[in-house]
Image (cartoon, rainbow, N blue to C red):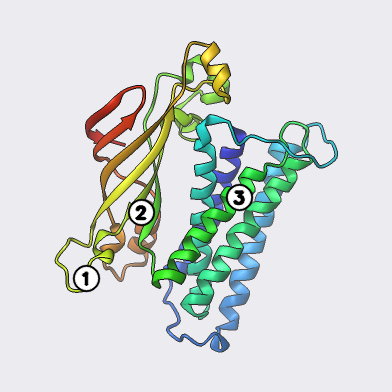
């Protein structure tokens, strides 16, 4: 569970920096030989310093006083109904997106920016797994590596296939009844629950419908269709633990509407940065949920 806090913390640090450079005027050339070297140096130095500081901070908070042992693996692929794995996918995708926009700012072509952004997303996440591998309290997770790589490749693959992003990973959260049962694990406050309570987390794929329709269509560019995934009845990581506690866990799938804020055109650097961040979130909207425990349900306002 602590991994979620570590990833979100680094994600926030990195995206704050990349949103700044993204808000700057983008060099319009498509020839990577005309990269603005001054901007490239700024990007490399700034990112390296921030990431290095983030890793040092993580070491102080999570690893410094934890028992160490030789590098080892830990199979957590069957925990939390894989909601945490979707979180890894989501985080790495947005790391990669932020990095690709930063590379574009230096004058690198769109295609190469997406490629190196995806590589950067994987590179940024990998040291955290290695540190976990040397910690007796964690262990490196092969499924985490796979989820991280999948998030980065999801961004690059769309541009390789369509030349643009058509499907956006998003996140939403609502408070649940479970944290009070294990507050040390699921959170003692709202801010902790956002990161720790997987029962209230929903991850979405927001689909730009208009981009799949013929050119010239009149479908609203700002209105997307979203499919979501979550799980509930979990106060322990493993299914058998929850079942023994009288809480059989179950998956939930969702179908909803979503707003594509990137359809808003603005020259304001502040609004561009704000849109970049807010568009990572699935805003409240009507939804239909599907689960084995509750069947089909309509929600007039789901988040």
- 80 displayed left or right of 137: left
Return the x and y of residue 244 as percentages of the image width and height: 55, 11
Label 1 or label 2, whichever lies nearer to me, is: 1
- Provide the residue designation for mark 2: 279
For marks 1 and 2, give the CA distance: 25 Å
Q: Residues within 10 Å of mark 1 (few under 14, many from 20)?
A: few
- Rendered residue at 71%/34% (across/down): 138
Q: What number of labels is visible?
A: 3
- Rendered residue at 53%/11% (across/down): 245
Label 2 or label 3, whichever lies nearer to me, is: 3
- 281 displayed left or right of 260: right
- Rendered residue at 46%/22% (across/down): 249
Q: Evaluate whether residue 234 shows in this view.
A: yes
For marks 3 and 1, give the CA distance: 35 Å
Contact between marks 1 and 2 (CB within 8 A): the answer is: no
- Provide the residue designation for mark 1: 214
Could you tell me which secondary element the residue under label 2 belongs to? loop
Quarter of the image containing the N terminus?
A: top right
- 203 displayed left or right of 301: right
Residue 148 higher or lower than 160, as above or below: above
Contact between marks 3 and 1 (CB within 8 A): the answer is: no
Sequence order check: which comes first, mark 2 or mark 3?
3
Q: Nearer the viewer, residue 93 or 47?
A: 93
Residue 225 higher or lower than 285, as above or below: below
């Amino acid at each position: 569970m602590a991994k979620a806090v570590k990833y979100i913390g680094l994600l926030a640090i990195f995206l704050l920096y990349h949103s700044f450079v993204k808000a700057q005027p983008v060099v319009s050339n498509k020839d990577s030989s005309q990269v603005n070297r001054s901007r490239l140096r700024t990007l490399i130095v700034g990112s390296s310093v921030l990431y290095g500081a983030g890793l040092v901070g993580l070491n102080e908070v999570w690893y410094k006083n934890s028992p160490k042992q030789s590098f080892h693996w830990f199979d957590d692929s069957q925990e939390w109904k894989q909601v945490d794995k979707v979180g890894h996918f989501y985080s790495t995708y947005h790391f990669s997106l932020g990095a690709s926009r930063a590379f574009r700012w230096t004058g690198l072509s769109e295609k190469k920016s997406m490629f190196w952004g995806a590589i950067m997303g994987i590179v940024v996440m990998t040291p955290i797994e290695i540190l976990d591998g040397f910690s007796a309290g964690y262990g490196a997770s092969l499924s985490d590596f796979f989820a991280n790589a999948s998030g980065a490749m999801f961004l690059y693959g769309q541009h390789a296939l369509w030349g643009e992003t058509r499907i956006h990973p998003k996140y939403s959260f609502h408070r649940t009844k479970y944290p009070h049962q294990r507050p040390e694990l699921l959170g003692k406050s709202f801010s902790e629950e956002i990161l720790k309570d997987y029962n209230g987390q929903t991850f979405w794929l927001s689909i730009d419908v208009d981009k799949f329709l013929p050119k010239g269509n009149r479908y609203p560019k700002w209105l997307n269709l979203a499919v979501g995934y979550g799980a509930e009845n979990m106060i322990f990581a493993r299914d058998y633990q929850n079942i023994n506690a009288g809480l059989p866990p179950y998956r939930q799938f969702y179908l909803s509407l979503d707003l594509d804020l990137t359809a808003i055109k603005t020259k304001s650097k502040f609004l561009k940065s704000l849109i970049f961040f807010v568009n990572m979130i699935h805003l409240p909207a009507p939804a239909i949920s599907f689960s084995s425990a509750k069947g089909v349900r309509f929600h007039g306002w789901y988040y």
